[in-house]
Amino acid sequence: MSEVAMKIVNLKKHIGKKEIIKGLDFEIYPGEVFGFLGPNGAGKTTTIRMMVGLMGITEGDVLIQGKSIKTSFKDAIRHVGAIVENPEMYPFMSGWKNLKHYARMIPGITEARIKEVIALVGLEKAIHEKAGRYSLGMRQRLGIAQALLHNPSILILDEPTNGLDPSGIREIRQYIRNLAEKENVAVIVSSHLLSEMEMMCDRIGVIKNGEMITIESVKDAVGQSDMKEVFVEAEPIQDVRAYLEEQELKVKDSEGGLLFNVKRDDIPSVVKGLVEKGVQVYSIQAQRSTLEDKFLTWIGENTIE
Ligand SMILES: Nc1ncnc2c1ncn2[C@@H]1O[C@H](COP(=O)(O)OP(=O)(O)OP(=O)(O)O)[C@@H](O)[C@H]1O
């Protein structure tokens, strides 16, 4: 991937004496979903607000398709569609009328384009119903449709699944992935939930205290997320240890038993092996994946649900 949709260069934000964003550097490419993951207060919203020109930049720059948001705002922002705060919708108007109303403010939007964005977010069936009757997920999709009207190459969504039920989350995820894969849009989303980010994103940037701690490719991380730490309570425990070590598994002592690392798919054969060795197994329990462990140490225990 040589083309860059957005380039963040040494981006900083100070408010009063507080350094809120401390120098971010990264790039986002067309066709990828990039996730900003971090605990509350990490600086995700502040960064996004600077990216779309809703907040001044203290130092550094955001280049959108090569254009600086600071010095070429108009040329830069025309490539961006964003939902940063709740999208404004008129509840008494249909989804269609809302989009038409909004489209009037953007030069050159045709009715065909309105139909196109409706299809992109799967709202064809409900588009003539009043927006006030939409579920939160449908409203969110209408907001995305609105943000897509001017055909941006970058879509930025701050916490797009906040408040949605599991089926709403699944739908949004599907439409976001579609936009990246089929329309080659670079999508930037933020969330404090790892599980959600893992399913939605190609890459995840972990942000904490205004700093980017790491950027991980989800594909590369899949192998790691498949590894589980397993707790076993069994007797005689020295036979358990001997067997696990024979299998070349990493073993640690733990209160009342042992912990070992193993691929999830291999857990049944380990249990079978232990039983065949004549070991009495009282309990066996898979703990968090090692990827989750890694993120937990980075961003803090209470941010993973
Ligand atoms: N106007 C402001 N004045 C002072 N501090 C601010 C201001 N706006 C944000 N902050 C602080 O900046 C930090 C980053 O806030 P930000 O909203 O960007 O975090 P976030 O990662 O988006 O978290 P959340 O998920 O809670 O929105 C927080 O500590 C917040 O208190």
Image (cartoon, helix red, strand yellow):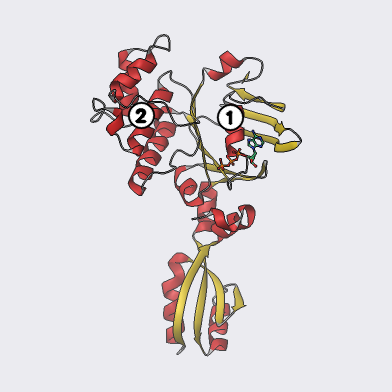
- The percent coordinates of residue 80 (x first, y second) are 51, 23
Q: Earlier in the sequence, mark 2 or mark 1?
A: 1
- The percent coordinates of residue 74 (x first, y second) are 57, 14
Q: Is mark 1 within 8 Å of ligand 1?
A: yes
Residue type marked 2: Leu
Taking depth in this image into account, of 249 and 22 the one nearest to the observer is 22
**Badge 1, how many Cα within 10 Å: few under 14, some, many 20+?**
some
Tag 1 secondary structure: helix
- Seen at 49% across and 31% down, the residue is 85
Q: Which residue lies under the disc numbered 2?
A: 142
Q: Quarter holding the N terminus?
A: top right
Q: Which mark is residue 49?
A: 1
- The percent coordinates of residue 47 (x first, y second) are 61, 33
- Seen at 35% across and 33% down, the residue is 139
Residue type marked 1: Arg
Report ligand 1 position as a quadrant.
top right
